[in-house]
Amino acid sequence: MQDYYQLFENNRNWSARKHEEDPEFFSRLLNQQSPKYLWIGCSDSRVPANQIVSLAPGEIFVHRNVANQVVHTDLNALSVIQYAVDALRVKHILVVGHYGCGGVKAALNNNRIGLIDNWLRHVQDIRDRHEAALDAIEDPGLRLDRLCELNVMQQVVNVCQSSVLQEAWLRGQQVRVHGWVYDLADGLIRDLEVSAGCKEEVMERFQGALARSHRGL
Ligand code: CO
C-alpha cells in the first residue's frame, strides 16, 4: 500500500467518528461557516491552528505562510483578511508566531535557501530595525525567540494598517487584532499583549510590547 493511502483510511475513520459523535455535524456545516476567528500562522507542521486551540471545523478561518507574515502587497493574505472581516465578520484576528521558527531563524542568520530568501527578507527588515536590542541578547536561542516575538508584533501592526482593518474600524465594526506566540516546548500560547481594536491603540500597544519580552529577557 502506498504510504499516502493511509490518509484516506484516516479520513474515513475521522468522518465515521464525527458522524457517530454528532449526526448533524456535516449537514450543519454544509451550507455555511460562521467562524469568529481568523488565524494567521506559520506553515510549520507543528503548529496546527484548530488543534492548538481545540476548535472544530467551521470555527476558525485560517491563513498560513512561512513565518506568519502579512506583507502589505500580498494579495493572498489581504484577500483572506478582507473576506474574513467583510464577509465572515470575524471578531478576532490572531497573528500567531512560534518560538524556534525556522523561517525566522534563517532570516536572523542570513541562511541562503533559495527563492524563499526573498520572502524572508521582510523578517530581515524587522531584524535590522531592532539590531541593537537583538545584539544585546547573548544567548542565540533567546535572540531567535525575541525576533519571533518582534515579527509577530510587526505583523499585527501590518494587519491593522491594511485598508481592510482601517475601513472596518472607520465604519465602527468590532474586530480586534491580537499577537500570540506558541511555544513548541510546552504547547502553550503566550499573549504578547499587543491587541488593538481601533486605530489609536495600534502603535501604543506595539510600543508597550517593545519594552517587555515574554521569554524573561
Ligand atoms: Co515557523
Image: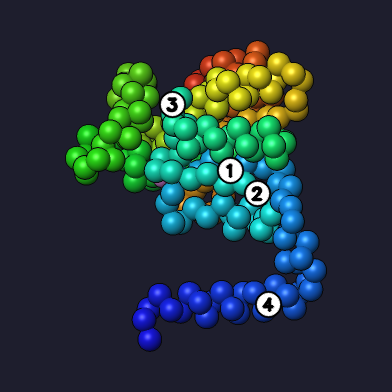
Task: Give the numbered dot on residue 73.
Answer: 3
Give the residue type at disc 3.
Answer: Thr
Label 2 or label 3, whichever comes before in sequence order: 2
Q: Looking at the picture, tell me which residue is in the foreground, 184 or 33.
A: 33
The residue that mark 1 highlights is 39
Indicate whether 52 appears above or below 155: below
Q: Residues within 10 Å of mark 4 (few under 14, many from 20)?
A: few
Tell me if the residue at label 2 has its CB under 8 Å from ligand 1. Answer: no
Q: Position of residue 182 (x, y in %)?
A: 52, 46
Give the residue type at disc 1.
Answer: Trp
Q: How is the image coloured?
A: rainbow
Q: Residues within 10 Å of mark 1 (few under 14, many from 20)?
A: many
Label 4 or label 3, whichever comes before in sequence order: 4
Q: Residues within 10 Å of mark 3 (few under 14, many from 20)?
A: few
In front of the other: label 2 or label 3? 3
Q: Is residue 122 left or right of residue 28?
A: left
Task: Give the numbered dot on residue 17.
Answer: 4
The residue that mark 2 highlights is 60
Label 4 or label 2, whichever comes before in sequence order: 4
Question: Disc 2 vs disc 3: Cβ atoms closer than 8 Å?
Answer: no
Q: Position of residue 199 (x, y in %)?
A: 64, 16
Indicate whether 97 appears above or below 48: above
Q: Looking at the picture, tell me which residue is in the foreground, 162 or 30.
A: 30
- Secondary structure of the residue carrying tag 3 is loop
- Secondary structure of the residue carrying tag 2 is strand
Residue sitting at x 76%, y 20%: 172
